[in-house]
Amino acid sequence: MPLAQTNLQLFKQARAAGYDADAVLILRKDYETACFLHAHGMRRSGKPLLCHLVGAASALIADNQDILLVRGLLNHAAYVLGRFPTGARGMRGDHRRWLRGRVGAEVEQLICDYTAYKYSPETVARLAGGNPQSLSGRDRELLVMRLCNDVDDAAEFASVLERSARWRDPSYIENLKALCVALNLEACSAAFGEIAADREDAAWLSPDVITGFLGHRQSVLRYTKATLQDWRRALLG
């Protein structure tokens, strides 16, 4: 499933899906908020963080989800990775007020709920073996958002390059696909099929292939912390 990776691709996809001009302009403002928070962010695969945010939102549009969820997923990493005007990160009161002023109270609360949502391979396995359709409205929304986030998280060989333990387990992808089928997320279900195929075709990727990067405005303390984290990842594999 081709996912939008730029703001312009996302806007075009939204228009093709039937979004009116006002809705697209709202997405444009939300993207500008994401730019402010994450403009220099990179993922371990070498993919710009902004592209991932757009891709996750794109997966929601592909499965005809509500624009509220699309807006929330476009800024879902705000409190985890975002750098606020204070220069700090985290879900502080002043940060929440700032984000609420940008995206509105309803979307900001959705982002808070998403940040607090308990999601792990164990959760996915339990839900896949149960009845996810019986979930309450908000829990169902958050699960759908997480599934769409995982779609872009793993697409295009990223499941190999990210070097995360959850993607090394084939049953995790199968459980994700089963959840998508149960929740009628046809586009996401197909995407996880493609992701599984990519993993089968990943032999060309050397085990040593990994992207390193340094954040912008790097202080000595942050540089030292990033270096120690890289060493720890190398030791733990």
Image: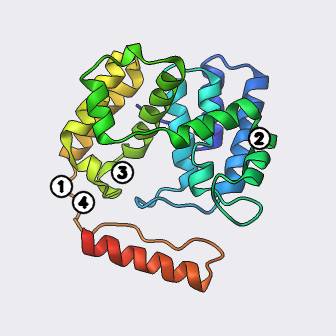
Q: Which residue is mark 1?
A: 203
What's the residue type where badge 4 is placed?
Leu
Q: Which residue is mark 3?
A: 158
Q: Residues within 10 Å of mark 2 (few under 14, many from 20)?
A: some
Please, is residue 73 above or below residue 13 in the view?
below
Which SS class for mark 3?
Answer: helix
Quadrant of the rendered image containing residue 196: top left
Q: Are marks 1 and 4 in contact (CB under 8 Å)?
A: yes
Distance (Cα) linking label 1 and label 4:
5 Å
204 sits left or right of 156 in the view: left
Q: Earlier in the sequence, mark 3 or mark 1?
A: 3
Distance (Cα) linking label 4 and label 3:
11 Å
Q: Residues within 10 Å of mark 4 (few under 14, many from 20)?
A: few
Q: Residue at x 46, y 27 (%)?
A: 144
Query: Residue 168 location in percent, x, y?
Result: 22, 50
Instruction: Tell me the mark number nearer the camera, choosing from 4 and 2.
Output: 2
Distance (Cα) linking label 2 and label 1:
45 Å
Q: Earlier in the sequence, mark 3 or mark 2?
A: 2
Q: Residues within 10 Å of mark 1 (few under 14, many from 20)?
A: few
Which SS class for mark 2?
Answer: helix
Of residues 189 and 197, the one nearer the viewer is 189
Q: Is residue 84 visible?
A: yes
Q: Is residue 4 visible?
A: no
Distance (Cα) linking label 4 and label 2:
42 Å
What's the residue type where badge 1 is placed?
Ala
Query: Residue 130 location in percent, x, y?
Result: 27, 20
Q: Quadrant of the C terminus?
A: bottom left
Q: Residue at x 57, y 61 (%)?
A: 41
Task: List the single residue furthest toward the bottom.
Answer: 220
Query: Residue 134 location in percent, x, y?
Result: 40, 13
On residue 100, the disc is 2
On residue 205, the disc is 4
